[in-house]
Image: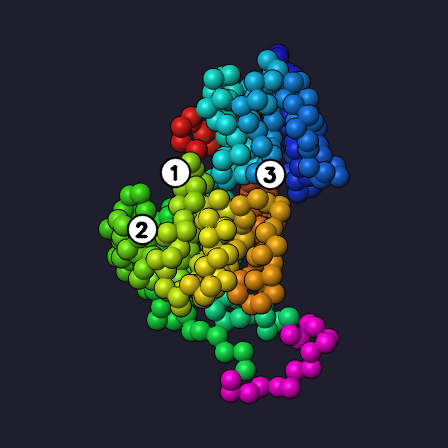
């Protein structure tokens, strides 16, 4: 490629108009106008001719696809915070750089996490459904109507005290929750002091002592089913689980069993093991008011999507200017 040529950038899903417009200005950008998910064969064809692939979290870029990539493909600039859908090691072996879009989803995801922490014990979705369903005639307020559980004064256990986990902790503290956390590494003394947070090096011990469990760790081989059947059974029967990270971190089958048997009081989920498929048993539990289900919308604000697009653009431009992209993902760290 000569200096004046624009890199060919293949974008797998429709992005905000402002992002796509800027990409068309800067690159030879191939857009997905109708937002149809690309098949394995379509991705392979794109990777055979493009200089840059811009996938999203729903695109599985495995070793097989990477091995079929053409010699021009030098950058996979993922439009996502995590890269668990990309075989970074296989990309490195082919000399392909991988980037992501970190640190732009923190506040939105933390907001949604707290929304679920409020929605589940206070039965917000159940209450809203009663008024929306014309088959029910609401008789008005009464002392025992739609009783939930107070969150102030309770303990929250945060699994993964990174950027999002810390943002969740700040919000939870403002709502009167006592902060507990489990992390690979202890956070700074200043952060602990400001949050009045209690660190647990044993996840098992923390799970048995808190009223809410918020899953905020990244998805890696080490965190697959971190919340296993055994660990879920350590939770108190009055406790709640909220997951806005990745579905595979929680053993979904075991969670369904715990909810069905009343081993935990409820759950709020924005992510699932087999997205976009949702286990019918979870849907049934939702209809019974035992779980609140959201369609992976934790980071779904226009602002976050534009911020993500800007990071993708910066990573591409930096790479083709001959510099190291600011959000490069190194092999073995995803």
To which residue does mark 2 refer? Answer: 203
Residue 96 appears left or right of 188: right
Between 127 and 27, the one lying in front of the other is 127
Secondary structure type for disc 1: helix
Is residue 12 placed above or below 163 in the rendered structure?
above
- Rendered residue at 75%/39% (across/down): 34
Asked if labels 1 and 2 touch by Cβ distance under 8 angstroms, the answer is no
Can residue 11 be seen?
yes
Is residue 119 placed above or below 253 in the rendered structure?
below
Among the two numbered marks 1 and 3 on one chain, the one whose residue lies closer to the N terminus: 3
Among the two numbered marks 2 and 1 on one chain, the one whose residue lies closer to the N terminus: 2
How crowded is the residue under tag 2: few (<14 C-alpha within 10 Å), some, or many (20+)? some
Between disc 3 and disc 2, the foreground one is 2
Between 40 and 311, the one lying in front of the other is 40
Which percent across, then down, holds residue 18? 66, 41
Q: Magenta region's main secondary structure?
A: loop
Is residue 142 highlighted in magenta?
Answer: yes
To which residue does mark 1 refer? Answer: 222
Q: CA distance from mark 1 to mark 3?
A: 21 Å
- Rendered residue at 64%/86% (across/down): 139
Can residue 21 be seen?
no
Which percent across, then down, holds residue 122? 50, 71
> Start and end of the magenta stretch?
130-144
- Rendered residue at 42%/36% (across/down): 221
Which percent across, then down, holds residue 301? 59, 51
Is residue 208 placed above or below 140 in the rendered structure?
above
- Looking at the image, what colour scheme do you see? rainbow
Residue 125 appears left or right of 260: right
Asked if labels 3 and 1 touch by Cβ distance under 8 angstroms, the answer is no
To which residue does mark 3 refer? Answer: 58
């Amino acid at each position: 490629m000569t200096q004046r040529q624009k890199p060919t950038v293949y974008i797998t899903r429709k992005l905000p108009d402002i992002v796509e417009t800027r990409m068309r200005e800067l690159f030879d950008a191939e857009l997905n106008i109708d937002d149809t998910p690309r098949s394995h064969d379509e991705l392979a064809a794109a990777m055979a001719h493009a200089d840059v692939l811009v996938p999203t979290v729903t695109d599985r870029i495995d070793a097989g696809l990477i091995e079929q990539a053409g010699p021009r493909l030098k950058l996979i600039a993922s439009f996502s915070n995590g890269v668990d859908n990309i075989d970074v090691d296989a990309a490195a072996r082919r000399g392909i750089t991988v980037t992501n879009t970190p640190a732009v989803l923190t506040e939105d995801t933390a907001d949604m996490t707290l929304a679920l922490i409020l929605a589940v014990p206070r039965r917000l979705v159940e209450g809203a459904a009663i008024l929306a369903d014309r088959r029910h005639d609401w008789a008005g307020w009464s002392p025992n109507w739609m009783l939930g559980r107070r969150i102030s004064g309770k303990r929250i256990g945060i699994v993964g005290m990174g950027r999002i986990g810390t943002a969740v902790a700040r919000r939870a503290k403002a709502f009167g929750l006592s902060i507990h956390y489990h992390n690979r590494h202890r956070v700074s003394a200043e952060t602990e002091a400001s949050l009045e947070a209690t660190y647990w090096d044993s996840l098992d011990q923390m799970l048995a002592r808190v009223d809410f469990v918020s899953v905020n760790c990244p998805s890696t081989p080490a965190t697959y089913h971190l919340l296993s059947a055994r660990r879920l059974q350590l939770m108190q029967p009055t406790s709640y689980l909220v997951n806005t990270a990745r579905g595979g971190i929680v053993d979904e089958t075991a969670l369904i069993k715990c909810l069905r048997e009343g081993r935990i009081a409820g759950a709020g989920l924005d992510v699932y093991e087999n997205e976009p498929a949702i286990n019918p048993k979870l849907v049934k539990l939702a209809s019974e008011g035992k779980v609140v289900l959201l369609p992976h919308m934790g980071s779904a604000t226009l602002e976050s999507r534009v911020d993500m697009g800007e990071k993708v653009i910066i990573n591409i431009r930096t790479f083709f200017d001959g510099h190291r992209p600011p959000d490069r993902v190194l092999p073995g760290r995803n």
